[in-house]
Image: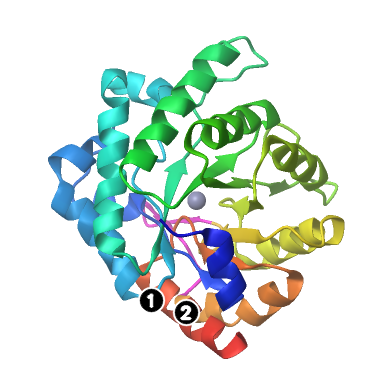
Amino acid sequence: MSSLLAALKSKNILVSDGAWGTFLHQRGLQPGECPELWNSTHRADVFAIAKSYIDAGADMILTNSFGGSPLKLEHYGLQDRCAELNEAAAVISRTAAGTDHLVLGSIGPTGVLLMMGDVSEETLYDGFRIQAEALKRGGVDAICIETMSALDEACLAIRAARTFTGLEVVCTFTFEKTVSGEYRTMMGVSPAEMIQAVKEAGAAIIGTNCGNGFDQMIEIVQEIRSIDPVTPILVHANAGKPIFQDGKTVFPETPEMMAAKVREIIKSGANIIGGCCGTTPTHIQKLVDAVGICR
Ligand SMILES: [Zn+2]
C-alpha cells in the first residue's frame, strides 16, 4: 500500500484519471443498468477503461464504484452485493495500476438527504463503512469521496472511511456559480464551509470535481487556496460545460484546451489534476505532458 501524501511530496504535482461513465456506455452499458454490476459481469471492459488511463500516464486511477453505496445499489435490487461489487472494483483497478501507480476508491453521494429525513445517520454511516472496507480489501491506497454537495453526508462518509480503513481520505465537492457570482453546492455549501467541515471530519486532501470546465475550476481552486494555504487540493474538471448538439451531449473542451490551462491551475494551488465528465485518456495524456513541463 502506498501513501498519496507521500507520492505528492516526492512528485509535487500528480495527474489523476478522467471519465469512466461515458466509456462504460460506449462499451454497451444500457441506460438503467447498474454500472457497478459490470465489476462482476464485464470485468474485461472495466479493466480496459482503468488501463487506458494508466497507459495515458496518469499517476493514479479511481475505481468503478461511484454508485456503489447500498442505498444506490438498492435501485437495482443489488444492495446485498455492496461488499462484493466494491471489492471487485478495487481489484480491477489495482490489477490495472500495478504496484507503481496509486488507486483511489471512489465513493459518490447516496442520493438521499439526511436533512429531509430520508434516511437515518446510522444507515448512511453503515453503508459507507461497508463500501470503504470492501474497497480496502480490494487493495485501494486511499478513498476518494466525490461529487458531494451536503456537508453532513460527506462528513459521515469521511468518518466511516477513516475509522474503518485508516486510509487517507480525499473529499471533493461539486460547486456551481450562483447568479451573484459566488460558488455554492446544490445544497448551498460554500468552499469555506466545505474546507472546515471535511478537514475536521478527517480528510487529508480536499478539492472539487464535476460541474465545471477548467476556467471555473481555476476560480474555485483559487478560492479554496486563499482560505487554506496548506491542504493539498485535488481537482477533477469536466471537459467544459456540456452542450446539447444533434441529440447528443457534447463536452466542448479538447485535450489541448485543458492542457493549455495546466500552468494556471497549478499556480492557483492545485496539487492533483484530472478529469471528470467528458474527459478521455487523450485529455489525461495531454495533462500529463503539460504537468511534466510545469513540475
Ligand atoms: Zn463529472
The magenta stretch spans residue 147: no
Q: Which residue is mark 1?
A: 57
Give how far across and how far down residue 247 sits, in percent: 36, 51
Q: Quadrant of residue 224?
A: bottom right
**In the depicted structure, whether residue 102 falls above or below residue 148:** below
- The three-letter code of the residue at mark 2 reads Val
Is 178 or 125 nearer to us in this picture?
125
The magenta stretch spans residue 243: yes
Left or right: residue 153 versus residue 151 is left
Give how far across and how far down residue 218 sits, in percent: 70, 66
Of pointers 1 and 2, the one earlier in the residue sequence: 1
Q: Report the quarter where the C terminus lies.
A: bottom right
Labels 1 and 2 touching (C-beta < 8 A) = yes
Q: Is mark 1 within 8 Å of ligand 1?
A: no
- The three-letter code of the residue at mark 1 reads Gly
Left or right: residue 29 versus residue 19 is left
Q: Quadrant of residue 83?
A: top left
Give how far across and how far down residue 192 sits, in percent: 82, 45
Q: Secondary structure at mark 2?
A: helix
Q: Which residue is mark 2?
A: 288
Which region is colored magenta?
A: 242-254
Q: How many marks?
A: 2
**In the depicted structure, whether residue 135 falls above or below residue 287:** above
Spatial separation of the CA atoms under disc 1 and disc 2 = 6 Å
